[in-house]
Amino acid sequence: MCIQSKKLVILCLLASIHGSIVAMVSHVHAQTSTTKDELVREVVELITAMEAYESQGQYAKAIPAAERLLEIARENFDSKAPRVARSQIHLAMLYHRSGAYAKALLLYQRGVANWENALGEEHPEVAIKLNNLASLYKAQGKYEQALPLYQRGLAISEKNLGKEHPSVALTLNNMAGLYYAQGKYGRALPLWRHSLAIAEKTLGREHPSVAQTLNNLAELYRGQDKYEQALPLYQRSLAIFEKALGKEHPFFANTLNNLACLYLAQGKYEQALPLFQRALAIREKSLGKEHPSVAQTLNNLAELYRAKGKYEQVAPLYQRSLSIFEKTLGEEHPFFAQALTNVASLYWVQGKYKQALPLFQRSLAIREKALGSEHPEVALTLNVDGAQKPRKSGDDRDSPPAAITALGPWLDVARHQLAASELSVRV
């Protein structure tokens, strides 16, 4: 088979990653090469396996197939070809959703560069890829790098597709999530409302994208203690996810986790507990036990036990959560800082003030660096200068320094912020 014909076959095969396998097979049917037939069979099997795992939210299990598809693309196309870029972006998305952020970043960056070279910097496909890269930066806590990418992607989409297109709704949703993470709730709310209106109009009221924005809006209302407004949004989000994706999908687990956080904030512990446990089981099964989403639910479950005074059950959950965040997100991420705060708060309520203080100080430093001094989590900043005042001779009690005593209001803010868990961000 000539090289050009082989490339045409591979082109159609790889297009099915984002399209119809049926159309791809019908094209290949006319070919006769034995080598080609073997390749067709392999690609069909890879795509089938990958899409099956993705539909269940088992992204880590889909990665080997996606890695092989990228390898095939590279073997048959120029390294800067759009089909290679498409495979790079798809594999990056799987790494992203699996919590392998370092691997995802490299592929996203290469994929975006290839799309820009092939299609131009103002193409709608480039806007989608910019959104994906921005979402990864947001997940890493690199908010200043994420915002200009969202803004550029939004401008490209609005210019080429119009202001009522689903791609515009997607970017508005994710940009709102960035503002929410920065504590800029006044900027987040109108963007989520606008995103929801576009998504319902263009995709229908039962689409998963609608469910994600409903979940995110509910998170914002819950963060503002507007529980009566949050509850019906969570419930509607859950109903859509269950119908569209099933009860074992990570997106369904996200909203379960967040609804449980609402019940926790209301003191409805018996309603929160089974939801946290179910969300944890789904996340561990679909994402693996070392995923950041698992760490968040572990933290939130620990918060529930702490609220009930079951401290012996709290410590191992906090420690496991902290270890996962450190491993997957690094020691400068806001989630890691929040986990530090929670471990410190456990020491604090147990009267272990000497162990609590350095953790508080480290957490505050990370938060201020990552979120800025105006963020709600940092606004009540601890002045640690007086925390190390020498004690009177003979006073060796582990009693709370003045700085720790003043930390009470900030502690409540910090703990509840982590209990907010994650937003469902579509990539």
Image (cartoon, rainbow, N blue to C red):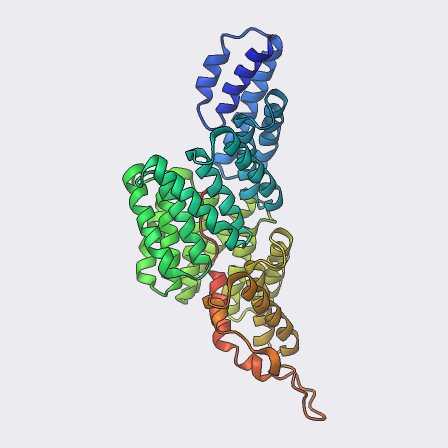
Residue 84 drawn above or below residue 225: above
Identity of the residue drawn at 59% across and 17% down: 39
Q: Quadrant of residue 204?
A: top left
What x and y, as percent, mark residue 84?
56, 28
Q: Residue at x 34, y 62 (%)?
A: 227
Which residue is at a point 63% across and 27% down the rendered structure image?
Answer: 71
Q: Is residue 11 visible?
A: yes
Seen at 62% across and 78% down, the residue is 353
* Residue 242 in view (yes/no): no
Q: Residue furthest right?
A: 394
Closest to the observer, 63 or 310: 63
Q: Quadrant of residue 330?
A: bottom right
Indicate whether 383 appears above or below 116: below
Depth check: 219 or 202 in front?
Answer: 202
Answer left or right for 253 relative to 77.
left
Residue 74 at x, y = what percent? 62, 25
Q: Position of residue 427 (x, y in %)?
A: 47, 41
Q: Quadrant of the N terminus?
A: top right
Give 144 or 311, whichever is nearer the viewer: 144
Q: Is residue 9 above or below residue 125?
A: above
